[in-house]
Amino acid sequence: QKEVEQNSGPLSVPEGAIASLNCTYSDRGSQSFFWYRQYSGKSPELIMFIYSNGDKEDGRFTAQLNKASQYVSLLIRDSQPSDSATYLCAVNHSGGGADGLTFGKGTHLIIQP
Amino acid sequence: GAGVSQSPSNKVTEKGKDVELRCDPISGHTALYWYRQSLGQGLEFLIYFQGNSAPDKSGLPSDRFSAERTGGSVSTLTIQRTQQEDSAVYLCASRTRGEAFFGQGTRLTVV
């Protein structure tokens, strides 16, 4: 069973602070990792992907990957109320197939003005 | 098309009726997924199609649920004899490699 775990939250962060979202996965053969944002009543939309160990930055967002620890995180700097959403971690496993892409349950992030 | 298209966007049906939900994936995408999301919950995997291979139906909650994908493109999810617990948003996603792209979903309400 290939699992992707996230803290469901809610995670409450004051405006302007750094929001840190975490995700762990069970399959060491996992190759690529995605962060999706889902606003209430909307579909998930991709905001970041990362394939290699280390950090990947895109604007206020930084994805961090540590394959040895089977851990991927998303940092949101200078958090804005518009960042309030559910963030879904998705992992592409090596085996392919339906469980080749597994989603976590998501973390509900609330940015307090 | 430019994105994943799902129809209808909203469906209200009476308990016991059958419903069909449609997904038109991004052109050229070989993989197609159906998920269900109840209010405030995470994504629940239902079924997966990959090219011409037999679909992975391991997520379907009961034999009232079935899905087809014709010509490797459009997919239809059918729910027979709907129950109130079937009320949810049904999301379709397609991909080749890399990220999955989601449609806007069909909100199904069984009354």
Image (cartoon, coloured by chain):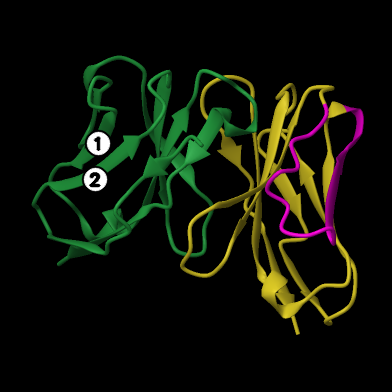
Chain colours: A green, B yellow
Q: Position of residue B103 (x, y in %)?
A: 64, 46
**Quadrant, the C terminus of chain A:** bottom left
For the residues bearing labels 1 and 2, Cβ distance under 8 angstroms: yes
- Which residue in the rendered view is the most extreme toward the bottom? B111
The amino acid on which the numbered mark 2 sits, given as a three-letter code, is Leu
Whether residue B1 sits left or right of residue A4 in the image: it is: right
Q: Position of residue B107 (x, y in %)?
A: 67, 66
Query: Are labels 1 and 2 on one chain?
Result: yes
User: Which picture quadrant has residue B100?
Assistant: top right
Q: Chain of mark 2?
A: A
What residue sits 29% from the left and 28% below the top? A70
What residue sits 75% from the left and 42% below the top? B57
User: Which picture quadrant has residue B30?
Assistant: top right
Q: Position of residue A49 (x, y in %)?
A: 38, 27
The amino acid on which the numbered mark 1 sits, given as a three-letter code, is Ser
Instruction: State how far apart marks 1 and 2 are (Cα).
Output: 5 Å
Q: Is residue A42 visible?
A: yes
A53 up-or-down from A77: above or below: above
What kind of secondary structure does the magenta stretch mostly adopt? loop
Find disc 1 in the rendering and name its residue: A73
What residue sits 68% from the left and 48% below the top? B59
Q: Nearer the viewer, residue A47 or A33?
A: A33
Q: Chain of mark 1?
A: A
Name the N-terminal-most of marks 1 and 2.
2
